[in-house]
């Protein structure tokens, strides 16, 4: 049985920030260069940068926290016995990365006894980071300001979707998941932009968008964003309104528009 070891969460967060920066540096060695793109069994792309970055993250975690479990997109799950689990996406937005678009990120989430307690989202091409730990707040290093003191990340005060901005990755994901009707309701509700993948949730957490709708997700896509959104004052849930990181479809909001946004994905009147 897993036993929860005593650990300073702020120290764990500092380690995760360093690890994300190192993985991001690996990704940037390949960004906007020529490299081979492979196709995985689920028809998603993968590159040498994804694999190198995840191996480096795993090596760092193994050296610092050898008893922790690790789950990563590229190399599966390594069991642990500490009660802690690291969940890794070395490059979230590989399609953007492949095309030389800077809206990709290194994602690190940490669970303690099954509860998501820590998250880091680092966009290395923008040099932008958002991070949080339960009870420690959510913090933002805006693009290109690595040396600056982090500022508190807070969701926006906008209370209606019609007055705000909604973001998503791709209409194709709504098609693939048979959620075309949801997409049609969303585009009728207000302004939409396709600022994709992890960047969409970063925008909500930092008050630059009010809601992000994603109909196709994996746990490594979601792992950092539950603590990030909660500590920023928002919500991160599945399409039933339950806070979790293992949902196949997710919704992040500033909290004020949560009921309205949830109604759009649940096929009921707001």
Image (cartoon, rainbow, N blue to C red):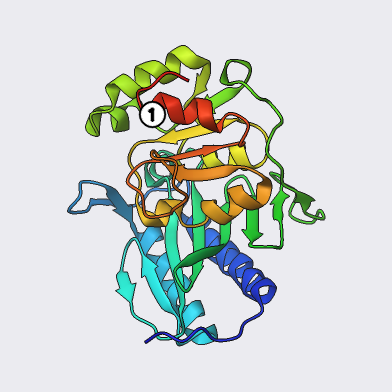
Quick one: 234 or 217, which is closer to the camera?
234
Residue farthest top in this picture: 188
Q: Position of residue 89 (x, y in %)?
A: 42, 58
Horizontal side of 20 relative to 175 (left or right) equals: right
Q: Position of residue 129 (x, y in %)?
A: 64, 52
Q: Is residue 223 above or below residue 233?
A: below
Mark 1 falls on what kind of element?
Answer: helix
Q: Is residue 248 above or below residue 54?
A: above
Q: Residue at the location (30% across, 33% down)? A: 173
The residue wearing badge 1 is 265
Quick one: 160 or 215, which is closer to the camera?
160
Quick one: 157 or 36, which is closer to the camera?
157
Q: Residue at the location (31% across, 53% down)? A: 46
Quarter where residue 51 is shown? bottom left
Quadrant placement of the N terminus: bottom left
Q: Residue at the location (51% across, 78% down)? A: 60
Quarter where residue 163 is shown? top right
């Amino acid at each position: 049985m897993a036993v929860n070891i005593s650990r300073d969460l702020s120290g764990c967060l500092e380690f995760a920030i360093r690890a994300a920066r190192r993985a991001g540096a690996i990704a940037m060695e390949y960004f906007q260069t020529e490299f081979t793109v492979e196709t995985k069994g689920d028809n998603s792309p993968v590159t040498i940068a994804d694999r190198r970055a995840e191996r480096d993250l795993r090596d760092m975690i193994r050296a610092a926290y050898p008893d922790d479990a690790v789950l990563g997109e590229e190399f599966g799950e390594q069991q642990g016995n500490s009660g802690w689990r690291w969940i890794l996406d070395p490059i979230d937005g590989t399609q953007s990365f492949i095309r030389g678009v800077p809206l990709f990120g290194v994602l690190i989430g940490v669970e303690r006894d099954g509860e998501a307690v820590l998250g880091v989202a680092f966009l290395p091409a923008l040099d932008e980071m958002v991070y949080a730990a339960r009870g420690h707040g959510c913090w933002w290093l805006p693009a290109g300001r690595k040396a600056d003191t982090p500022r508190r990340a807070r969701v926006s005060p906008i209370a209606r979707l019609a007055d705000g901005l909604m973001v998503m990755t791709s209409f194709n994901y709504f098609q693939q998941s048979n959620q075309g009707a949801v997409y049609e309701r969303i585009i009728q509700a207000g302004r939409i932009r396709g600022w994709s993948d992890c960047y969409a949730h970063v925008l909500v957490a930092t008050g630059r968008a009010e809601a992000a709708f994603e109909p196709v997700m994996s746990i490594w896509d979601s792992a950092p964003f539950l603590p990030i959104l909660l500590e920023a004052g928002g919500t991160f849930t599945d399409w039933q309104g339950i806070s979790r990181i293992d949902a196949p479809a997710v919704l992040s909001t500033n909290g004020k528009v949560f009921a309205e946004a949830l109604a759009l994905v649940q096929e009921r009147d707001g």
